[in-house]
Structure formats: C-alpha cells, structure tokens
Image (cartoon, rainbow, N blue to C red):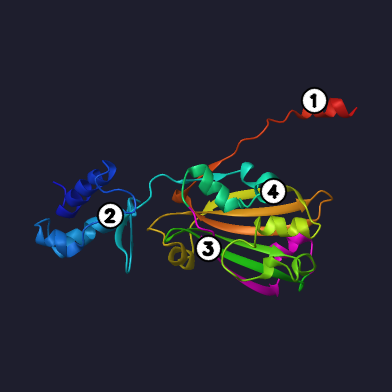
Amino acid sequence: MAPKWRELADRLAERIRSGEYGPGQQLPHIRDLVEAGEGSKSTVHAAYKALEAEGLVTSSRGHGTVVRQQAPLKRLGIARYDKAKWRDGDEVAFIADRVASGRAYRRHEQTQTISRIVAPPLVAAAHGLPEGAEVYARARLVKEGEQPTHTLTSYYRPEHVEGTRIVDPSPGPAGRGGGFRVLYDAGYEIDHMKEEIHARVPTPEEVKLLQLPPSEPVVELHRTTYTADGTVVEFAIGVHAASRFAWAYDFQVPDSARTEESER
C-alpha cells in the first residue's frame, strides 16, 4: 500500500495533467489541504516535494508551489539568427524564440551586467587572445514572466565594442536589433557561427539563479560568432534550464562530394 503522501501526490499530478491546475497556477497552500483533510502538514509537504522532483511544479519563497509551464519554448537553431530579424527589424534571438513559440515577451525580461575582465582561458582561446588580455563580459539573465529560462554571457574584444550600446548595462537588448546590429553598424557583420551544446549537472548558484527543481540538468551552450574573414567578434556561454526549451534545427543537408566536384 502506497504511503499517504504518495497517494496525495498522484491525485494532484492527475489534476495537473488533466488541466484542472494549469501552467502558472498556484496549488493550494499546505494548510488549506491539511484543513481539507488531505493529510498532515508533513504528508502534504512530502507530496509537494515529490511533484517538484517529478518536474510538475516549482516552489519558491513568495510564490508558493506553482504548476510548471509544460510546453517548452522553441529554441530555434539557424533561424533565430536570420539577418532580416535583427538587421532589418528588431527581433533579437530570444525574442525570435518567443515569437516562434507563440508566447508573449517584454524586452526588459533580459537583464544584464557589464564588466571588463581578464579573459578566462576558454574565452581567450576562442578569441585567439594572449594570457592576461582583457575582454568585455556582457552577462544576461533572461526570464519568461517571473521564471528565469537561461543565462547568456557574451565576451567581446574591447576594440570591437568600446563606446557602443553593447557595453551599456541598461536592461533589455542593446538597442534596436540587439548586439549583432551594433556589431554590424561598427563594420563587423556576422557571417557564420559555431554552436556546441552539452548537458550537465547545475552548480548550486545556477540552481538558485534559474530556480531549478531538484534533479533538473542544464544545457550549456558555447557560441562562437565570426565575420566573413574569420574574425571572432563574440564568444558566448549560455546555461539553459533543460526542460524549458525544445531545440530545433532546420538546415540544408550538405553533399560534400558534389561540392568537391563543382570546385574542380
């Protein structure tokens, strides 16, 4: 026979899956369920902790226990960097993801901190800089409403961005079109990029910052952005809550044999 907390957790889980408790909706306070005869305080608390461990809810001080958004954001691959979005319009990458997902957004859901630092070894290697060289670090925290979705820290050579909106700490993208438009206007048009991703266990600081439930991994992104002549104009590290994104890539399938033939 299952313990009482497990039975309560299963009943609540069914109500969540049926839509009775929808995404973003707060579950009853523990005391309310106790008063309704659902069990003792420890029973209800254990049931809520089980739902959190199963990824159905999140719990935080001041917000209580809330049903998680079950439909992840579409994290576009190539399409999010379409030049027409940021060069000719004002659809920066995180906004392109929201638009593709049919979700609302506010530009100020991206906050940021700007600092000039000695380049960490990984950053220095990406930019081809010597040990001790300085870079600008533009660290962003992106939220959907009140829920953080990911962090992204971009590293730039000072000579590329000094005096531009990229080093302005104001919340939101770096003006119309964001950072890529700033680089474009400065004569550094992006041409191609490389993205590498891997999953890992989050650090305690990331658990707190991203408000992660127990046992949720993160997906770490490394993005290197180049101009046509191979100059690295940005190296970025992103940390994404794994369950809050669905990564999508749509691209032409290469045929290297035909490419080699056409070059002969």
Disc ID at residue 50: 2
Q: Which residue is mark 1?
A: 258
Q: CA distance from mark 1 to mark 4?
A: 34 Å
Report how many numbered discs are placed on residues in the image.
4
Give percent across and percent down for residue 220: 56, 55
Q: CA distance from mark 4 to mark 2?
A: 48 Å
Q: Which residue is mark 3?
A: 108
Quarter of the image that includes the C terminus: top right
Q: Amino acid at mark 4?
A: Asp
Label 2 SS: helix
Q: Residue furthest right?
A: 264
- In front of the other: 237 or 61: 61
Q: Amino acid at mark 3?
A: His
- Going 68% across and 30% down the picture, which residue do you hit? 253
Q: Amino acid at mark 2?
A: Ala
Choose the circle earlier in sequence order: 1 or 4: 4
Give percent across and percent down for residue 215: 40, 56
User: Dots 4 and 3: beta carbons under 8 Å?
Assistant: no
Give percent across and percent down for residue 123: 70, 63
Left or right: residue 146 versus residue 250 is left
Q: CA distance from mark 3 to mark 2?
A: 34 Å
Q: CA distance from mark 2 to mark 1?
A: 55 Å
Left or right: residue 199 versus residue 162 is left
- In front of the other: 150 or 197: 150
User: Dots 3 and 2: beta carbons under 8 Å?
Assistant: no
Label 4 SS: loop
Q: Which residues are magenta?
A: 105-130
